[in-house]
């Protein structure tokens, strides 16, 4: 009763296998399913488990055949995987199934196997690391952002200007329409919250004033039905508020944080920006190196993995159902790139014995505990509760892999 497996097609990590299960094996599976039903089902006039097989088959014939079919497909799949010693990437699919009375069960098994990654070349690559540069202008921009966050809105009696917040009543009417009472809106002028024509009209009126004139809607307005239309717009300015940011001085530095002076705040901002720049540069160097390794060591990626990756991100970002196809098209190449990156890191870690150990994990937690001035057990408990221990293990493994790679490749820093 040997099951026959005949390869039909093979491309990359995809396998199409024609499967034929002999009649004897089909009958045996049906008999086992029938005996199980006979031992468990209740039929009127018979004690539990004592109904004749012929009666059970007549009553539950379709269910028995379905159970036998599922068992045969599952066992055939398991036998093929064990026989070929393959690692399956995802659940297989069954196609062209034929299950006729008195004939062999035949179907085509479509599956994807885990890619075989040799990584014959992992050295001899050259990567340039940009120098960390944080300019005075960048520091000043960050300080201005901090000032903006501390700014207050104060009512003014003047006509609004760009940057002001105006609370306005807006009513519109097109040709042949009656004026509506309009609605109130808070609008920050210059922030793109209203079309240019309406913003210009708002800036012609002081608080308490009403102005009215025709305004043309832009040709690129999101609502296509309104593009290029000219409407009469009536605006009443109810209130105008102007943003006032605190002066950039020592008092501001003390308000922002535990800084004795403005110079101390500037130095802290610069240091933070330099750390961030170093992190970004390091990530870029790692990606350059991985990209070169992938280019030099071709391997296929299971489509099912890419699809699952895209689906997970679509759910995480709550992409609407009607936009998922477009999202998948735009995100698929990035998903495949990330999967290739993870596979390269995983392969090198296993091959070179660089996977994070319990000691590595303990050392990392102890380091974090020392910085935060808490007990290591407290951090461990928090990370275990939030499910982030695996994330830390992956981070440690990745750090060890990239140290190994950078020791074996030319990573130069630009002057």
Image: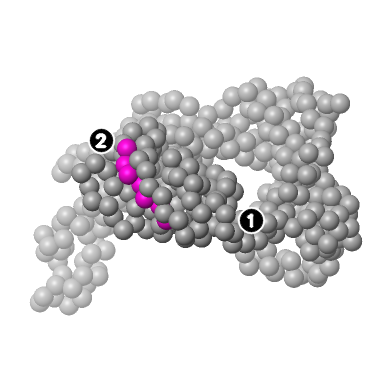
The residue located at (57%, 38%) in the rendering is 339
Estimate how packed mark 1 is, as few (under 14), some (14 to 19) or many (20 or more) residues with alpha carbons within 10 Å: some
Q: Earlier in the sequence, mark 1 or mark 2?
A: 2
Residue under numbered circle 2: 96
The reply to whether residue 154 is in sight is yes
Position of 61 with respect to 214 (left or right) is: left
Secondary structure category for the residue under label 1? strand
User: How far apart are the two marked residues, 1 and 2, measured between alpha carbons?
Assistant: 70 Å
In the rendered image, residue 50 lying in the magenta stretch gets the answer no
Horizontal relation, residue 110 to residue 142: left or right? left
Residue range highlighted in magenta: 230-236
Residue 408 image position (x, y, % from top left): 81, 29
Q: Give the x, y percent position of residue 148.
A: 68, 53
Circle 1 residue: 243
Residue 236 quadrant: bottom left
| Figure quadrant of the N terminus | top left
């Amino acid at each position: 009763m040997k099951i026959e497996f005949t390869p039909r097609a093979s491309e990359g990590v995809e396998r199409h296998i024609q499967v034929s299960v002999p009649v004897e094996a089909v009958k045996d599976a049906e008999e086992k399913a029938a005996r199980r039903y006979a031992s468990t089902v209740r039929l009127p006039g018979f004690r539990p488990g004592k109904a004749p097989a012929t009666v059970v088959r007549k009553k539950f014939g379709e269910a028995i055949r379905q159970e036998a079919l599922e068992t045969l497909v599952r066992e055939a799949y398991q036998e093929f995987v064990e026989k070929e010693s393959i690692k399956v990437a995802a659940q297989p699919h069954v196609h062209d199934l034929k299950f006729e009375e008195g004939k062999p069960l035949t179907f085509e098994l479509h599956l994807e196997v885990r890619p075989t990654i040799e990584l014959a070349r992992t050295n001899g690559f050259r990567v340039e690391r940009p120098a960390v540069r944080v300019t005075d202008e960048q520091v000043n921009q960050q300080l201005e952002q901090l000032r903006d966050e501390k700014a207050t809105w104060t009512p003014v009696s003047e006509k609004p200007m760009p940057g002001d917040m105006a609370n306005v009543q807006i009513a519109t009417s097109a040709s042949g329409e009656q004026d509506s009472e309009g609605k109130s809106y808070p609008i920050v002028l210059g922030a793109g919250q209203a079309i240019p024509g309406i913003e210009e009209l708002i800036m012609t009126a002081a608080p308490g004033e009403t102005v009215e004139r025709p305004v043309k809607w832009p040709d690129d307005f999101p609502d296509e039905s309104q593009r290029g239309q000219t409407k009469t717009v009536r605006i009443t300015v109810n209130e105008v508020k102007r943003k006032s940011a605190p002066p950039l001085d020592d008092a501001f530095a003390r308000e922002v944080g535990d800084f004795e002076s403005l110079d101390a705040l500037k130095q802290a901002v610069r240091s933070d920006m330099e750390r961030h720049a170093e992190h970004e540069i390091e990530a870029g160097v790692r990606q350059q190196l991985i990209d070169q390794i992938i280019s030099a060591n071709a391997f296929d990626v299971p489509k099912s993995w890419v699809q699952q990756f895209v689906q997970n991100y679509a759910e995480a970002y709550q992409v609407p159902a009607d936009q998922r196809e477009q999202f998948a098209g735009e995100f698929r190449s990035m998903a495949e790139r990330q999967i290739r990156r993870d596979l390269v890191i995983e392969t090198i870690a296993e091959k070179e014995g660089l996977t994070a150990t319990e000691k590595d994990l303990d050392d990392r937690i102890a380091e974090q505990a020392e910085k935060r001035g808490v007990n290591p057990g407290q951090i461990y408990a928090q990370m275990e509760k939030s499910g982030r221990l695996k994330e830390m293990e992956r981070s440690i493994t990745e750090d060890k892999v990239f140290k190994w790679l950078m020791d074996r490749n030319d990573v130069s820093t630009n002057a």
